[in-house]
Amino acid sequence: MRFAVLILVLTLAAPAIAQVKPDVRPGDEPTFEDVPRTPSVNRDRVIPDLAYVLGELHYLAYACEGNHAQAWRNQMQELLDLEAPANGYWRERLIDNFNNGFRDQQRYRLTCGAQVEAERRELASRGRQLSDSLLAPLLAEDSTD
């Protein structure tokens, strides 16, 4: 599951990709068992927070761009596919957080404009911070090799 999060985090945090060592050969990629466990990252808090932010971003895109704007919902689906592919508590928790983020924005943002664009930038920055917090221990482990 941690390797799956790494894939999602790399997708959300594109600048971090440049930090990957160029001498990695195919077959040398870390496996699930190789991913370090770090007490400094509370994944049980960070991943649901990320789902909430994705829900907020999805509502703002949906409200301002129309129902064809599905990029953030697709990111959430990818998070679910990677982190909670089977039905159960963890999947329901992530879905609930996504839906709560969507509904909270829906209550407070009725019109689009400059304020919404600023909110979108702030939320995207928050999502990047959450992603980076998941990625940082993996990059730190990589730099000690």
Image (spheres, grey):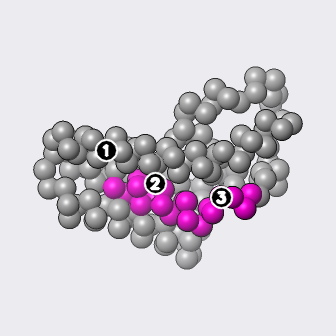
Pick the residue in front: 49 or 81.
Answer: 49
Magenta region, residue range: 38-56
Q: Say whether residue 41 is magenta.
A: yes
Instruction: Please rate how many residues cluster around mark 2, counting C-alpha atoms within 10 Å: few if below 14, some from 14 to 19, many from 20.
Output: many
Residue beneath disc 3: 41
Secondary structure at badge 2 equals helix
Q: Is residue 51 above or below residue 141?
A: below
Is 3 placed left or right of 97 in the picture? right
**Residue appearing at x 79%, y 43% in the figure:** 141
**Which of the marked residues, 3 or 1, is nearer the chain's N terminus?**
3
**Which of the marked residues, 2 or 3, is nearer the chain's N terminus?**
3
Residue beneath disc 1: 120
Q: Are marks 2 and 3 in contact (CB under 8 Å)?
A: no
Q: Nearer the viewer, mark 2 or mark 3?
A: 3
Q: Amino acid type of disc 3?
A: Val
Marks 2 and 3 sit apart, C-alpha to C-alpha, by 20 Å
Secondary structure at badge 3 equals loop
Disc number at residue 76? 2
Q: Is residue 98 above or below residue 31?
A: below
Q: Amino acid type of disc 2?
A: Met
**Residue appearing at x 74%, y 42% in the figure:** 140
Q: How far across and how far down the image is residue 62, in percent?
A: 25, 49
Disc number at residue 61? none
Marks 2 and 1 sit apart, C-alpha to C-alpha, by 16 Å
**Which of the marked residues, 2 or 1, is nearer the chain's N terminus?**
2
Q: Dividing the image into 4 quarters, which one contains the N terminus?
A: bottom right
**Residue appearing at x 71%, y 40% in the figure:** 139
Q: Nearer the viewer, mark 2 or mark 1?
A: 1
Q: How far across and how far down the image is residue 97, in percent?
A: 42, 67
Q: Say whether residue 83 is magenta.
A: no
